[in-house]
Image (spheres, helix red, strand yellow):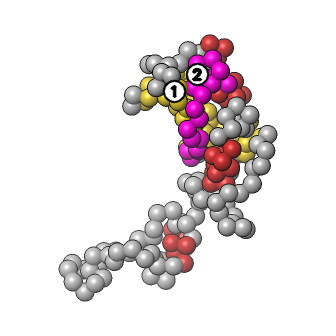
Amino acid sequence: MTGFAAGPLDGRAEVTDSFGDTVVDVAPGDWIELLTHVRDGLGYAFFDWLTGVDEPPDAFQVVAHVYNPDTRERLLLRTAVPRDDPRLPSAVGVYRGADWHERETYEMFGVIFEGHPNLVPLLLPDGFEGHPLRKDFILAARVAKQWPGAKEPGESGHGAPSRRKTLPPGVPADWGSPDA
């Protein structure tokens, strides 16, 4: 693995390799220290992106991607926040570019970035309820309005008979049949 020396995080950071990328995992309490260490101590000055990953049933992963322009190396930095209280210190004080990404992650996953200068909705319409990138988010619109995509085999009057109708992914079984 290249590009990461734990330094002040020795013993608190787990460094692994994933498909050729160096991945560094820390506890939420070490998040800001990790970001500061890779920026100031290791030269990862370029912040690329930050997002959430839903890991049911217990946690959300918060993942950041940073880049060292001198060595042309990249790191994936990760931490896990509990699903029942997803809070993490804001990275905006370390990387200004994290602002937009934290707002999106807050809106789509419900992760609260404490200390963020303007943690308000970014993409969804006013009054939208819920966090649509969570795996438990119900896709009610898939039941309320027929999917506009291609027809099922046999529905066009040509070809094989129609398959058994099933509910779209993300729709609970007790929401009725797809033909209702």
Residue at 60% from the left image edge and 28% from the top image edge? 45
In magenta, the rendered stretch is 36-54
How far from the left and from the top, in percent, is residue 139? 55, 66
Residue at 73% from the left image edge and 68% from the top image edge? 127
Work out whether residue 23 can be spotted. no
Residue 86 covered by magenta stretch = no
Residue 43 got which mark? Answer: 2
Of the pair 5 and 140, the residue shown nearer to us? 5
Residue at 51% from the left image edge and 72% from the top image edge? 142
Q: Is residue 45 above or below residue 156?
A: above
**Mark 1 sits on what residue?**
69
Q: Is residue 125 above or below residue 154?
A: above
- In this view, the residue farthest toward the bottom is 157
Q: Is residue 30 above or below residue 104?
A: above
Report whether 123 appears left or right of 167: right
Q: What amino acid type should be assigned to the residue bearing mark 1?
A: Pro
Label 1 close to label 2 by CB (< 8 Å): yes
How far from the left and from the top, in percent, is residue 109? 63, 51
Of the pair 83 and 30, the residue shown nearer to us? 30
Q: Quadrant of residue 117?
A: top right
How far from the left and from the top, in percent, is residue 86? 70, 43
